[in-house]
Image (tube, grey):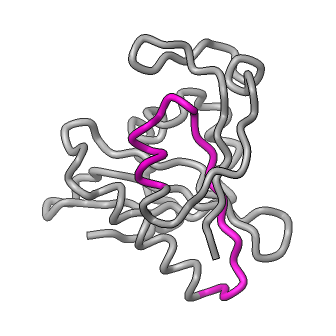
Amino acid sequence: MIRELKLGEALPWDLLLNADPDREIVATYISESRVFVAENGHQAILGVLVLMPLSEDHHYEIMNVSVAPAHFRQGIGRALMTHALSDIKARDKQAEIWIKTGDLTVDAIGLYESVGFEIVEVVKNYFVEHYAEPIYENGELLRHQVIMRLRK
């Protein structure tokens, strides 16, 4: 089941920090965002997606998508993406939706492309210059940010 967290509900910090390891950065956008969670029948949170409206009209960014490692490749990430995209399109017919990720997150990029996103830019050395601690994925230093936009 996918639902939006209500104001005041506990955030799934373990999942949020899997996708973005800097708690201070997550805290800067989480209060301005809508948080969707995927739960099993026992209300255990298996995945999370954070959607933030940007300052410009009709612009939104998916800030964080994370699925518990034990539940990878079960369609949870896709279900969260599909739900959030359908929800925002129903509310805002002119929505322009963006997502940013690391260039080493090949599985995530594949998921985003499969639901309609396309790569529009790569920002060199973004993660090296904007994060206090180095981020490694599969033993490799994460350096570059991939910016994607949902195709209209």
In reply to whether residue 115 is colored magenta, the answer given is no
Query: Residue placed at 67% from the left, 47% from the top?
Result: 147
- Residue 72 image-quadrant placement: top left
Residue 30 in view in this figure: no
Q: Residue furthest right?
A: 56
Residue 5: percent from left, percent from top? 45, 65
Query: Residue placed at 35% from the left, 55% from the top?
Result: 77
Q: Is residue 45 left or right of residue 88?
A: left
Residue 108: percent from left, percent from top? 44, 44
Vertical order, 98 against 65 (above or below): below
Residue 46: percent from left, percent from top? 27, 50
Vertical order, 142 against 40 (above or below): above
Quadrant placement of the C terminus:
bottom right
Query: Residue placed at 47% from the left, 68% from the top?
Result: 6
Residue 67 in view in this figure: yes
Query: Residue placed at 71% from the left, 43% from the top?
Result: 28
Q: Which residues are magenta?
A: 91-112
Q: Residue furthest left?
A: 41
Q: Is residue 26 left or right of residue 14?
A: right
In reply to whether residue 102 is colored magenta, the answer given is yes
Residue 80: percent from left, percent from top? 39, 63
Quadrant placement of the N terminus:
bottom left
Q: Nearer the viewer, residue 62 or 1?
A: 62
Q: What is the number of callouts on the image? A: 0
Q: Nearer the viewer, residue 89 or 29?
A: 89
Vertical order, 109 against 113 (above or below): above
